[in-house]
Image (cartoon, helix red, strand yellow):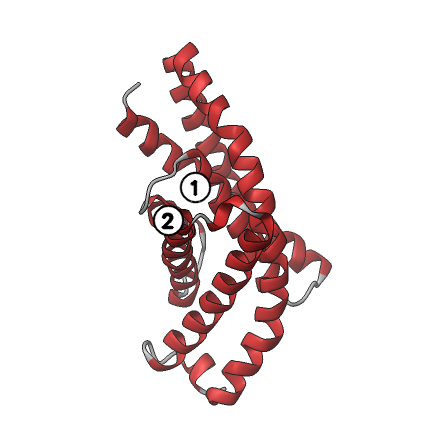
């Protein structure tokens, strides 16, 4: 299997898993009446994106995974809100830039610096999302909060997400490093079975999303 095919299948797989797990998380938190929910969704995102980046260590892959996950929401949700798609895409962009910088600086080699990378990236993601929704896309739900209200949201929900991301990125990177050689070994042993397995797994998570979002 050539590298491009492996990369495309991997992007589809991780994007589908992200979309499916987010759908499962949203439904579980809604059933349990758990709030705030966004920090848990942020944790799911960084776990998946950090793992994927170790398996496919190439700049831009995180954004492409986010595109798949955003498409998952677009096709699965009965009522699509732009802010939901924006949140996924923005997360992909922020963490792609973060991972690329961290890899070049060697920050992913030490647990403490890796955790700080996740924490800072999470705050940046929350700030970028809140202020882009309020003052770039003029979403009334966010604009009406004003600057003080937006900063308060970042300080509260964003701090929960940042704390979870501090540990989430460590777990995700560790998991990805363990998965990377297995992905390579699986594709070399049985190329067709590997491709079919990734496609069927991806379809399974899309089906999960369709069931939970319907």
The residue that appears at 38% across and 54% down in the rendered structure is 101
**Above or below for 166 versus 125:** above
28 left or right, relative to 125: right
Residue 166, horizontal then vertical, whole percent: 60, 57
**Above or below for 54 versus 88:** above
The residue that appears at 63% across and 52% down in the rendered structure is 167
Residue 125, horizontal then vertical, whole percent: 45, 65
- Residue 22 visible to an observer of this rendering: no
Please identify the residue farthest to the top as the structure is shown.
Answer: 189
Residue 69, horizontal then vertical, whole percent: 41, 48
Q: Which residue is mark 2?
A: 104
Mark 1 neighbour class, 10 Å CA radius: few under 14, some 14 to 19, many 20 or more: many
Work out which quarter of the rendered image holds the N terminus and state it: top left
Mark 2 neighbour class, 10 Å CA radius: few under 14, some 14 to 19, many 20 or more: few
**Above or below for 199 versus 64:** above
**Count of all numbered marks drawn on residues in the image:** 2
Q: Which residue is mark 1?
A: 53
> Foreground: 186 or 209?
186
Q: Which mark is residue 194?
A: none
Q: Secondary structure at mark 1?
A: helix
Q: Secondary structure at mark 2?
A: helix
- Which of discs 2 and 1 lies nearer the camera? The answer is 2
> Foreground: 201 or 102?
102
């Amino acid at each position: 299997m050539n590298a491009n095919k492996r990369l495309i299948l991997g992007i589809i797989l991780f994007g589908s898993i992200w979309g499916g797990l987010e759908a499962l998380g949203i439904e579980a938190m809604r059933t349990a009446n758990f709030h705030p929910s966004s920090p848990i969704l942020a944790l799911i995102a960084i776990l998946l994106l950090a793992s994927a980046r170790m398996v496919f260590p190439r700049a831009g892959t995180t954004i492409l995974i986010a595109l798949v996950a955003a498409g998952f929401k677009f096709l699965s949700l009965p009522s699509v809100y732009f802010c939901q798609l924006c949140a996924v895409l923005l997360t992909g962009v922020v963490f792609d830039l973060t991972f690329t910088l961290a890899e070049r600086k060697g920050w992913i080699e030490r647990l403490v610096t890796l955790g700080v990378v996740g924490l800072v990236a999470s705050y940046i993601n929350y700030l970028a999302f809140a202020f882009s929704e309020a003052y770039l896309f003029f979403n009334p739900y966010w604009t009406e909060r004003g600057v003080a209200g937006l900063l308060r949201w970042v300080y509260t929900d964003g701090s929960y997400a940042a704390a979870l991301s501090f540990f989430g990125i460590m777990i995700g990177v560790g998991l990805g490093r363990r998965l990377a050689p297995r992905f390579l070994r699986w594709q070399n042993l049985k190329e067709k079975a590997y491709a079919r397995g990734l496609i069927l797994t991806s379809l399974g998570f899309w089906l999960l999303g369709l069931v939970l979002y319907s």
